[in-house]
Amino acid sequence: MPGQASTRADHFLALRRQLREKRRSVPDSDRRAAERRAASLLGTLSVVLRARRMAVYLSADGELDLESFIADAQSRPTLTFAPVIKGDQLRFAPLRRDTGLRTGRFGIPEPAARAYIDPRRLDVVLTPLVAFDDKGTRMGRGAGYYDRHFRFLATRSRWVKPKLIGIGYEFQRVRKLERRAWDIPLWAAVTERGIYYFDDRRHKK
């Protein structure tokens, strides 16, 4: 019914606003500790350690900062890529130690590059989030960039790659989010408290 749909939408928007505010208000010392712990847990994942081409993100709006983890990845034979917003589309450009950055849409840093990788060639994608639930449903900022960019995953009967891994605080884990038809679920999520797998087949190795 229209009234119920409106109520669900209002709840969704309120939850997004509440969690973004909470994320921005985390004290610096707690934030740094959570970042170290999440990076340490990420470093135990074999799919991450074996990745030849990995998409990362450059933090904004209180998101967990992966700077030290990215530096470690770049010291290995791992090619890293970061998001660039082009119109209503998301792209991933090479991110190296010497890559120049610019401030993109929404005030998010992004590589000043014009070359982009085909998303099917990525092995792992580390994605920020506002919330996630126990089924791997991801709530983002609401613009749908990641869902559109990785919509080809929805047509696959077997999830091989890329593996989408959400990164966030434990308080961003919620019991249930409404999954819409266009939502692309996470393969796993990492917080400062642990690693959560969602794909039934797991593919941990």
Image (cartoon, rainbow, N blue to C red):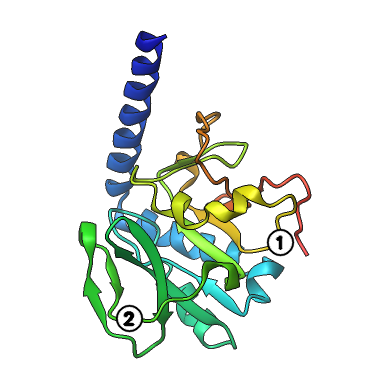
Q: Residues within 10 Å of mark 2 (few under 14, many from 20)?
A: few
Instruction: Classify 63 as above or below 174.
Output: below
Label 1 sits on a secondary structure element that is loop
Q: Position of residue 190 (x, y in %)?
A: 56, 54
Is residue 74 shown to the viewer in this render?
A: yes
Label 2 sits on a secondary structure element that is loop
* Image quarter hosting the C terminus: bottom right
* Camera-side residue of 87 and 162: 87
Q: Seen in the image, is 92 located left or right of residue 150? A: left
Q: Earlier in the sequence, mark 1 or mark 2?
A: 2
Q: Seen in the image, is 151 located left or right of residue 155? A: left
Identify the disc placed on residue 114: 2
Identify the disc placed on residue 160: 1
* Camera-side residue of 41 and 123: 123
Identified at 59% across, 88% down, the residue is: 77
* Image quarter hosting the N terminus: top left
Identified at 40% across, 58% down, the residue is: 64
Which three-letter amino acid code belongs to the residue tagged 2? Answer: Arg
* Camera-side residue of 76 and 6: 6
Identified at 43% across, 68% down, the residue is: 66
Q: Seen in the image, is 108 located left or right of residue 70? A: left
Identified at 36% across, 55% down, the residue is: 63
